[in-house]
């Protein structure tokens, strides 16, 4: 199962490291505790819209760009999960009604 907060955390961490910023620098710029940002990046805490806006401002990135990237990542994860999910096998029955069976 794809968890939005994990994908969001990965995107935020990548953006921070690409900018060469430490958690301490983002924490000071966003006025959010370092520990909380760390938890968000690890996907352990949900980011409120206000917190996310502060982080995006500190990282100098548009919120819409972050959400777009997270959305694309979630879509890819969902597609991959569908490809690996077992498909039901349809078994014809004498009654003429098909019955699904797990593969």
Image (cartoon, helix red, strand yellow):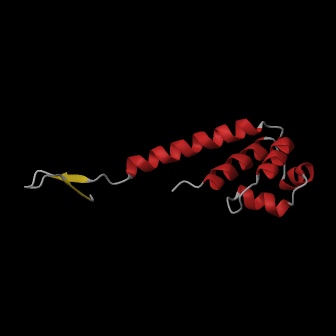
Give how far across and how far down residue 33 sits, in percent. Answer: 87, 60
Which residue is located at x 67 percent, y 58 percent? 43
Q: In this view, does 49 lie to the left or right of 58?
A: left
The quadrant in which the C terminus is found is: bottom left
For the point 76% across and 39% down, which residue is it? 63
Left or right side of 96 for 72 = right
Q: Where is residue 8 in the image (x, y as percent from the top left)?
A: 67, 49
Q: Where residue 48 sits in the image (x, y, percent)?
A: 76, 54
Is residue 59 shown left or right of residue 87?
right
Give the number of callouts.
0
> Can you name the residue that lies furthest to the left here?
94
Does residue 98 appear to the left or right of 1 in the view shown?
A: left
Q: Quadrant of residue 70?
A: top right
With respect to residue 81, does 62 lie above or below?
above
Residue visible at 77% across and 46% down in the picture: 17
- Tell me the residue at 81%/41% (across/down): 19
């Amino acid at each position: 199962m794809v968890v939005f907060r994990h994908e969001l955390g990965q995107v935020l961490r990548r953006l921070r490291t690409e900018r060469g910023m430490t958690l301490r620098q983002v924490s000071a710029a966003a006025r959010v505790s370092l520990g909380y940002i760390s938890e968000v990046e690890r996907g352990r805490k949900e980011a409120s819209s206000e917190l996310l806006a502060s982080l995006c401002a500190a990282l100098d990135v548009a919120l819409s760009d972050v959400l777009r990237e997270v959305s694309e990542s979630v879509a890819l994860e969902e597609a991959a999960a569908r490809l690996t999910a077992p498909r039901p096998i349809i078994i014809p029955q004498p009654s003429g009604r098909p019955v699904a069976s797990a593969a």
